[in-house]
Amino acid sequence: MRPDERLDRIFKEARGAVPDTSRVETGLETRVLARVREIKGRRPWYSLAWRLVPLFTAVTVALGIWYYASAPDPSADMRAAITAEYEDTLSLNILNGG
Amino acid sequence: MNRPYANADMDRKSRDDVMAMSGITDEGLVGAALSGDDEAFAELIRRHKRKVASTASRFARDIQELDDICQDIFIKVYQNLGGFRGDAPFSHWLMRIAVRTCYDALRARRRERLNVPLDSVDFALGGPSTEGQESARHAKFLLDRVMPRLKPEERLVITLVELEGYSVKEVAGLTGWSESNVKVRAFRARHALKKLIGEEYETG
C-alpha cells in the first residue's frame, strides 16, 4: 500500500475513534463557575481604591463644612476693623522706612 | 430540619432556570452573562461542552489534561465575553478560543519536553465495542505514537483538517493563519507522518 493511501486509511479509521469525554463533561460548568468566582475574589488592590472614592469624598466634604463652621466670625464693629487695618498699614510703613 | 425541603426547592428553582433558558439564543445568554448572570454562562457551557471536549480530546494526553484544557477554554471565554461582537455565531467564536487554547497547550508541552509514557495516552472510546472500533482504536493508538513528534502548528493543522473535518479555509479562520500557511503546514505534517508511520510499520 502506498504511504499516502495508508495515511488516509489511518485518518479515516481514527475519525471514527470518538473519545468518551463524558467524565469531563459531567459537572464541567460547576467547576468552571467555581474558578470564575475564585478569579472574581482575587481583585487587585487598586480596585479597592475606586470603591473608597465615596468615603474619601464624604470625608473631604465633612472637613470643609467643619472648617467653615469653626472659623471665627468676622468682626461686626466697623470702627475696630478700620482701626486694625490702619495700624497694620502704619506698622508696614514704619518697617519699610516710609 | 427543613434543609432537605429547602434543597428540593433549590433543585426545582435550578431546573426552572434551565428550562427558562432553553429558549434563549447563545447571544442572549452572552448578554445575560455579561450583566452578571452566572447561570446564563453555565447554560452556555452546557450547550457547547461536548463539542469543545471532543475537539480538545484530540490534543490532550489524558483525562486530567483534557479537563484542565476544557476549563481553561471556558475561563478564557468568560474573561473575553465583552469582546464577542456578535457578527459571527457564538460557536465560531468559542471554537477559535478552543483551538488557540489547544495550540497553547501543545506549545507548553513541547517546552516542558516531557517524555510521556504511552499508557498515559488513554481515552476510552464511546459507543459499543465493534470490529470497526477495534481498527479505529488501532489507528488512534498509532497516531498517538507519532503525532507528538510533529511541531505543534503542524499537529494542530493536520488534526483539524484530517480528524475534525474542517476545510483549509475554516482552519485559517480558527487559527488566524493564512490559507497558504495552513496548506504548507498540512503538507509538511502529512510528509512527516508518512515517514514516521513507515518507520513504525518497519519496526513492527
Image (cartoon, rainbow, N blue to C red):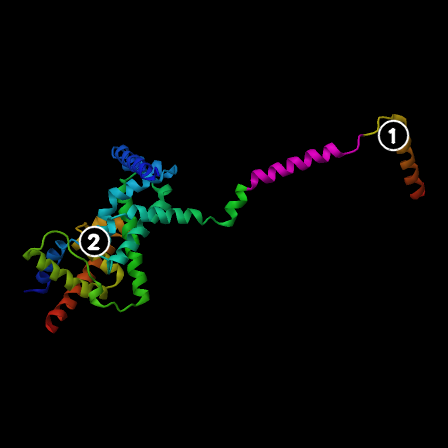
x 68%, y 35%: residue: A64
x 87%, y 30%: residue: A81
Q: In this view, does B116 lie above or below B3?
A: below
Instruction: Give the magenta range.
Output: A52-73
Name the image quarter holding the C terminus of chain B. bottom left
Which residue is disc 2 drawn over?
Answer: B160
Distance between mark 1 and mark 2 Cα atoms: 91 Å
Name the image quarter holding the N terminus of chain B. top left
**In-image side of B15 versus B134 (left or right):** right
Residue under mark 2: which chain is it in?
B
Q: Is residue A88 above or below residue B176?
A: above
Q: Which mark is residue B6?
A: none
User: Does the segment drawn in magenta span residue B160?
Assistant: no
Q: Quarter of the image holding residue B138?
A: bottom left
Q: Is residue B125 visible?
A: yes
Which residue is disc 1 drawn over?
Answer: A81
Secondary structure that dominates the magenta span: helix
Please state which amino acid type lies under the numbered disc 1. Ala
Q: Mark 1 falls on what kind of element?
A: helix
Q: In this view, does B9 lie above or below B107?
A: above
**Residue projecting furthest to the front:** B1
